[in-house]
Image: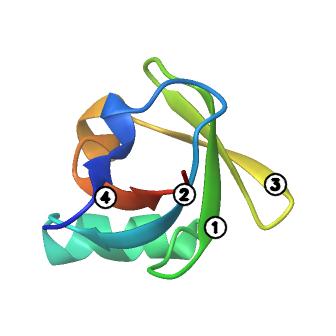
Amino acid sequence: MNGRSLADLPAKTRGTVAGFELPDDESLRVRTLGVCPGMQVEVVQNGDPLILSTAGTRIGIARRIAACVFVDTEH
């Protein structure tokens, strides 16, 4: 998978979700939260849970799941 894992990004990093390497049920759960390929996200706090901002809301994602969500970072 191209991009960097959400779990590897420091706070205040922005990027575009490139895809997931998750089982179908966890991928669906992440998508239901609003984290979908093509969405702009910003890491608010890197921890467990990882807090990110997308579409005007903040979402907490378990670090093990965030490690499987890949983003293309903005330079």
**Residue ID for mark 4:** 70
Residue that protrudes farthest toward the top in the picture: 47
Q: Amino acid at mark 4?
A: Phe
In the structure shown, which secondary structural element does the residue marked by tag 2 occupy? Answer: strand
Q: Amino acid at mark 3?
A: Thr
- Among numbered discs 1 and 3, the one appearing first in the sequence: 1
Give the spatial CA distance, label 4 vs label 1: 12 Å
- The residue drawn where x is 34% and y is 33% is 7
Q: Are marks 1 and 3 in contact (CB under 8 Å)?
A: no
**Image depth: mark 1 or mark 3 in front:** 1
- Among numbered discs 3 and 2, the one appearing first in the sequence: 2
Q: Position of residue 4 (x, y in %)?
A: 28, 49
- Among numbered discs 2 and 4, the one appearing first in the sequence: 2
Answer left or right for 13 relative to 9: right
Give the spatial CA distance, label 2 vs label 4: 9 Å
**Residue ID for mark 1:** 40
Which image quadrant: the N terminus?
bottom left
Residue 39: name its quadrant: bottom right
Give the spatial CA distance, label 3 vs label 4: 19 Å
Circle 1 packing at 10 Å, graded few (<14), some (14-19), many (20+), is some
In the structure shown, which secondary structural element does the residue marked by tag 4 occupy? Answer: strand
**Residue ID for mark 2:** 15
